[in-house]
Image: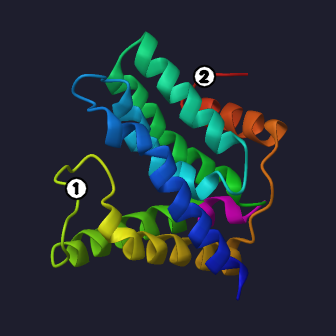
Amino acid sequence: MSLPIFRAVASTLLLYLINLPLYLYSPLFYPPLFSLGAASYHVAFFGLYTLWGWVFLASSLLISALVGPALGALLAYIGGFFLALALGNGTRRLLSLLLYLVLYVLLTNVLVLVSLFMPYLVEREDVPDPAHAPLYFFYYWALHWVFGRLIKPGLISAARLRVMAIALLRGFGRGK
């Protein structure tokens, strides 16, 4: 079996493990859990390549608890795209971001369309349904396969993330 299949299985399992608190507790009663749901799809993919995926998850939970759930969920959602930008090397950085964005939108829409015709075991929209595990496997297999072929991701270091953050801040007119 090939590496994308193993990574897709690991990503699918991670998705359900990360969302386990959402199965046990409703985000309506524990609002910081909204950021967990927002970050889980990104972390299940990027968490296999870098520890920084997990740092974004932890920081979004912390910001959700201390500042507000909306800000934590926003950080969790945008943090995944920032990691996609950092996953590429050299000239492939922009390709990495665009590819992740296109695949994220395309595969998510396919996932939603196909899931309409599948049974539901959980009657909540804020958690991935266990009956849809094959769809999530396909979702992550496609991401890992395409990224493995076109981007060939390496490990993301703290120095590379720092350089990327400074470049982004300069683009917004801040930073030195």
The quarter holding residue 107 reads bottom left
> Where does the magenta region start and end?
90-96
Using the rendered image of the protein, determine whether residue 2 is visible from the camera's viewpoint.
Answer: yes
Q: Residue at x 80, y 54 (%)?
A: 155
> Looking at the picture, which amino acid does disc 2 mark?
Arg
Instruction: Give the structural element (helix, strand or loop) at label 1.
Output: loop
Q: Is residue 89 magenta?
A: no
Left or right: 167 in relation to 24? right
Tell which residue pokes out farthest to the bottom in this image: 1
Say how many tags the image has. 2
Using the rendered image of the protein, determine whether residue 171 is visible from the camera's viewpoint.
Answer: no
Q: CA distance from mark 1 to mark 2?
A: 45 Å
Which numbered disc, 1 or 2, marks the residue that appears first in the sequence? 1
Q: Provide the residue designation for mark 1.
A: 122
Image mark for residue 64? none
Between 71 and 96, the residue placed more toward the observer is: 71
